[in-house]
Amino acid sequence: MDAPSANGNTGQESGGRRRWLALAARMLRLAVQQPQTTGDLVTCSYDRIAAGYDEAWTRHMRDRTLEMLNRLDPPVGAVCVDLACGTGFVSGELARRTGSRIVGADRSGRMLEVARGRHGATCTFVQADAVDYLRTLPRRSIDVVTCAWGLGYSRPAALVREAARVLRTGGRIGIVDNTLFSLAEVLWASLLAFAERPQALGHVMKVRFLPSSGVLAAVMRYCGLAVRAAWDGSERFFVPDGRSAIARLTATGAAAGFEFAAAESDRDEVFAAFARIMDERFRTDEGVAIVHRYLAAVGSKLC
């Protein structure tokens, strides 16, 4: 049975018959048999949106990112590493606050091109996976590690563990990221769209977003870090209709890689179904709501 819509409707609205068992079987088969390409697809997404990323995402989530940095309070002169640095907003802020030359690491070459153009005078940018980059650093060699909006596309436990290894005594870590439930309405609409065309599903994204700041705090403690603060929140944006929702989700990177979930030959039909469902279920007088639910935590290494 379909979940109720935002307007209280239940049924399938104007969509076709939904084949849930066929979709479940296809998802399971793809999850088991397909090569692990999620990381490459995410990188491809960010490469495509790099030029407009700051306008679409950084500007809108700026206050949430700055809240993490304010609570982190990086000391002047600190040796800092910014993981999943993207276009370098956090890297640039760290450089401004500490007076140090910051190292930022990201897998997307195009995002790093933008970062170098904007913050190259005060930061050094390295194209690398976050965890792999941390593993190249000596133990107790870093004062501050940050990761903004990229933890779920990495390996959270491994990233925090390696960060704890490279931090000096008294070193600090700050993380802000989307939660597992960040785009719950979008995910539900996507499932409904694919349930109408199970054969169109071409890739199952294997991501590792955490459900809450409490879980992130537990991971940090398990890795030997003291948690100074942990919090959750949300930001809501409205777009005119379902088609606009697709454009925004693509431009922000919040659903990076998901545009490749549909086989190319079926992509237009799946996107049309997704837009229709978003309009039918989540459109209000203000438009279609897109809710980004986020988590954050800052911690330190005591010994």
Image (cartoon, rainbow, N blue to C red):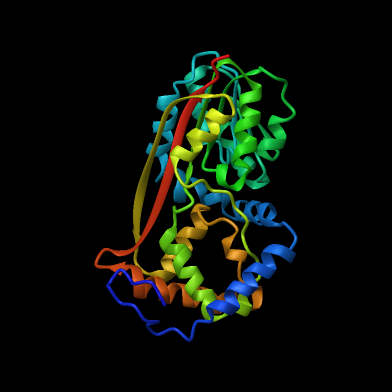
Identify the image quadrant of residue 238. bottom left
Residue 41 seen anywhere in this rendered image of the structure = yes
- Percent position (x, y) of residue 283? 32, 69
Which residue: 63% across, 56% down?
206
Which residue: 36% across, 48% down?
235
Horizontal placement of 229 versus 256: left or right?
left
Horizontal placement of 112 versus 54: left or right?
right
Residue 116 seen anywhere in this rendered image of the structure = no
Taking depth in this image into account, of 79 and 211 the one nearest to the observer is 211
Quarter of the N terminus within the rendering: bottom left
- Percent position (x, y) of residue 247? 47, 63
Taking depth in this image into account, of 26 and 98 the one nearest to the observer is 26
- Percent position (x, y) of residue 82? 58, 31
Identify the image quadrant of residue 130. top right
- Percent position (x, y) of residue 73? 44, 21
Q: Is residue 194 above or below residue 86?
A: below
Taking depth in this image into account, of 103 and 50 the one nearest to the observer is 103
Furthest-left residue in this view: 285
Horizontal placement of 99 versus 291: left or right?
right
Quarter of the C terminus within the rendering: top right
The count of marks equals 0
Which residue: 54% across, 75% down?
194
Q: Is residue 274 above or below residue 66?
A: below
Q: Is residue 276 above or below residue 155?
A: below
